[in-house]
Amino acid sequence: MRVRFVAALLVIVGCRAQEKSLAGTDAVAADLSVTVPSEVKQGDFLPVDVTLTNVGEKALVLESGGYEVQTDILREETGVQFYSLPGPVTTAEYRPKTVQPGASIRITRSWDLRNGSGTLATPGTYRIRAVTLIPGDSPVEVVSSPVTFVITR
């Protein structure tokens, strides 16, 4: 059973990116976080929650109702990328979506623990992070802090 926000069962971290106001533009601020179980058995699916939170004072408008995110999975011991979950990530609606200050969009994805060639990830510790670009007059790249998880036999 998965319980949210219990450190022993779940790991969540985020990273905030902000763009200072430039002449004629408003500041954009967003937080991107990745949440995964701290452990998954080899052969199971890893649920991956990616949450985009508007931490600024201005509404964010996502043109397609979602945002594109790259989710990289790396082997902790070597730092070598094992797989990158394909994007884009969208909400269920394909129309512009406004994310008001303080509001969030959470998308749940699933990874079958295989890379693009179909090779099953071996047991060990892995790191996952997400990267997205917030649209606007001056697009802002937001990168989550990496989260570690363990694949067991």
Image (tube, grey):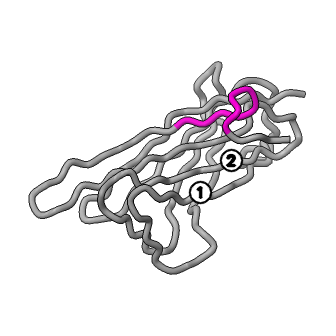
Point out the residue furthest to the top here.
77
Please name the residue that numbered disc 2 is placed on.
Answer: 48
Give the x, y percent position of residue 18: 30, 46
Q: Quadrant of residue 115?
A: top right
Q: Secondary structure at mark 1?
A: strand
Q: Cβ–Cβ below 8 Å for labels 1 and 2?
A: no
Q: Which residues are magenta?
A: 5-13
Q: Disc 2 marks which amino acid?
A: Val
Residue at position x 63%, y 73% in the image? 92
Q: Secondary structure at mark 2?
A: strand
Point out the residue furthest to the left here.
23
Q: Residues within 10 Å of mark 2 (few under 14, many from 20)?
A: some
Residue at position x 30%, y 57% in the image? 57
Marking on residue 47: none
Residue 149 shown in magenta: no
User: In the displayed structure, does residue 73 sit left or right of residue 132?
Assistant: right
Residue at position x 47%, y 53% in the image? 53
| Residue 55 or residue 141, whichever sits in front | 55
Give the x, y percent position of residue 140: 33, 53
Q: Residues within 10 Å of mark 1 (few under 14, many from 20)?
A: some
Please name the residue that numbered disc 1 is placed on.
Answer: 106
| Residue 73 or residue 34, whichever sits in front | 34
Above or below 108: residue 99: below
Residue at position x 69%, y 55% in the image? 109
Q: Disc 1 marks which amino acid?
A: Arg
